Amino acid sequence: MITRATIRRRTVVKIRDGRWQHEKDAVVVEEPLEMRLAVPSGARVLSLATLMRTPGADIELAASFLFSEGVINNRYDIVTIRYCVDADEEAQFNTLIVTLRPDVPLDLDHARRIFIVSSSCGVCGKASLEALRLRGCAPLADDPPVRVSGAALAGLDKTLRQAQDLFARTGGLHAAALFTPDGRLLAIYEDIGRHNALDKLIGAHLLAGQLDLLRQSVLLVSGRASFEIMQKALMARIPIVVAVGAPSELAITVAQHFNLTLIGFLRGASCNIYAGAERVVAPT
């Protein structure tokens, strides 16, 4: 297991009640991660994307990114994902080389076009329902039915805050957490990019062969619900998406079109349900 620093200590000036003090403060690490694709037929290595991320769970991040973009369909499409240890010391653990099975169909021109990303905006320029339809996405079937109670929802944001160890130390990270419908925390991943945090969560389950678990769970993201968040949830077939912040109009449209439940502005027992209210059990 390769361990990379996720926080560093920097000297800052803190102003409190008019007093200036020089203190050490914890700040979150942000570094680029370049994904390269090894093409066995031509013995070539192509650069596909550079993500800005917080080091950690890089393999899961790359796997889920390829999965959510429709490049792979399952974990068996991947032969290896490895760090480029031949690079210089600074870059070797910021570069991943992905080798796919030779029979995986790949449109390299399309791949280059879709891989334009950053930690702030995720995958850009593809915010359309047509892109999801062309990728073969279908509305979620409510089978087996997944239901969450208002009481279970009420505790999710508190549980998320308590589990965000790095955020508590830095104040600079987003989180994506997976819960059972009764509110039990299953997994949490943090990253400076909210889409990266979700990719790490999905990628961990993809590589572990646990995609079925995602399909029976509730996703909570620490920021707003954007098109990209809903796209990744749809590809992973996560039925219920909850955001601490606001959803975008397009995120709501995606939820409505593809039968996802979308909840925003979760604050304790308060929230807004924007789509799929039938999955939320009202108090009797």
Image (cartoon, helix red, strand yellow):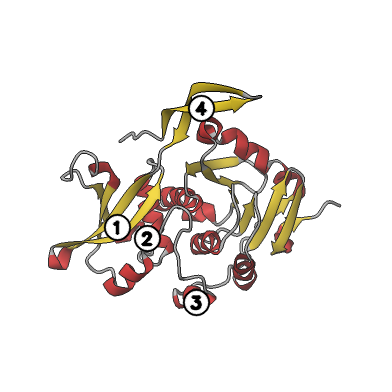
Q: Choose between 222 and 144: the one closer to the eye.
A: 222
Tell me the amino acid under the disc marked 1: Ile
Do labels 2 and 1 touch, CB within 8 Å? yes
Tag nearer the camera, 1 or 4: 4
What residue did someone put label 2 on? 66
Tell me the amino acid under the disc marked 4: Val
How far is mark 1 from mark 4, CA to CA? 47 Å
Tell me the amino acid under the disc marked 3: Arg
Q: Which residue is found at the position 27% from the left and 50% from the top? A: 96
On screen, residue 47 versus residue 175, left or right, reads left
First of labels 1, 4 by sequence position = 4
As helix, strand or loop, the secondary structure at mark 3 comes to: helix
Q: Which residue is found at the position 70% from the left and 59% from the top? A: 279
How far is mark 2 from mark 3, CA to CA? 17 Å
On screen, residue 37 versus residue 136, left or right, reads left
Q: Position of residue 238 (x, y in %)?
A: 56, 58
What residue did someone put label 1 on? 78
First of labels 4, 3 by sequence position = 4
Residue at the outermost left position = 43
What residue did someone put label 4 on? 13
First of labels 2, 3 by sequence position = 2
Do labels 4 and 2 touch, CB within 8 Å? no
Q: How many other residues sit within 10 Å of disc 4, few (<14), some (14-19) or many (≥20)?
A: few
Tell me the amino acid under the disc marked 2: Leu
Tag nearer the camera, 4 or 3: 4
Q: Quadrant of residue 246?
A: bottom right
First of labels 2, 1 by sequence position = 2
Q: How many other residues sit within 10 Å of disc 1, few (<14), some (14-19) or many (≥20)?
A: some
Q: How many other residues sit within 10 Å of disc 2, few (<14), some (14-19) or many (≥20)?
A: many
What residue did someone put label 3 on? 133
As helix, strand or loop, the secondary structure at mark 1 comes to: strand
As helix, strand or loop, the secondary structure at mark 2 comes to: helix
